[in-house]
Amino acid sequence: MRLILSVLLVLVSSSVSYGQGFDFNRYGRSPLDNHLKRESEPQRPSANLRANRYDPNSLSNPYGAGSRYKPDGLMNPYSQYGSRYSNDSWTNPYATNPPKIYSESGEYRGELSTNRYSPDSTSNPYGRYGSRYSPDSINNPYGAGSPYSTRPLYVRPSSN
């Protein structure tokens, strides 16, 4: 009887320790995380365009949102939002779905794009959001692009 109890105790303790040592992150996402993604949740800003280089959410921080190694980062040349060949990238001059820039209140401020011909691109020198003389442009140092402004500008992946 003692032998049976000791064998059962060893089996139960080994199965409990084996289950506790299993790491879901080693094999990808946990099946228990499926409930976390909901379509009704608002889209969070991916990066702050105007923050200082010590803010972890700033594109100027090479160890935060501006990291070349962040899997979904804007500065990663191999990610969906940083690749020269992706349709969702700001570095692709032919992209039709680049990231959008929004103010803190949610006001649209143009597209972060290298496309010089898109009307909403920040690289279009004659457009509303790219001209040095437009008050809505981040390229105007006396308008929306003022280096002294404390209002953040957020870059979000396009939802279209």
Image (tube, helix red, strand yellow):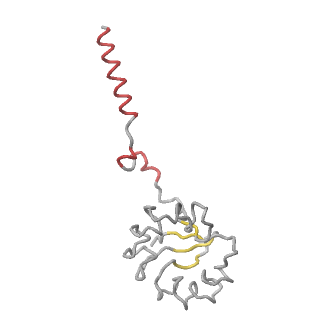
- Judging depth in this view, the residue of 9 and 41 nearest the camera is 9
Q: Quadrant of residue 160?
A: bottom left
How many numbered discs sit on the rendered protein? 0
Q: Is residue 125 above or below residue 92?
A: below
- Judging depth in this view, the residue of 55 and 116 nearest the camera is 55
Q: Position of residue 119 (x, y in %)?
A: 51, 87
Residue ID at (35%, 23%): 12
Residue ID at (57%, 84%): 129
Q: Residue furthest bottom?
A: 126
Q: Position of residue 141 (x, y in %)?
A: 66, 82
Q: Is residue 121 above or below residue 35?
A: below
* Drawn side of residue 43 relative to residue 8, left or right: right
Q: Position of residue 4 (x, y in %)?
A: 29, 13
Residue ID at (55%, 68%): 59
Q: Residue furthest top?
A: 1
Q: Position of residue 74 (x, y in %)?
A: 47, 69
Figure quadrant of the N terminus: top left
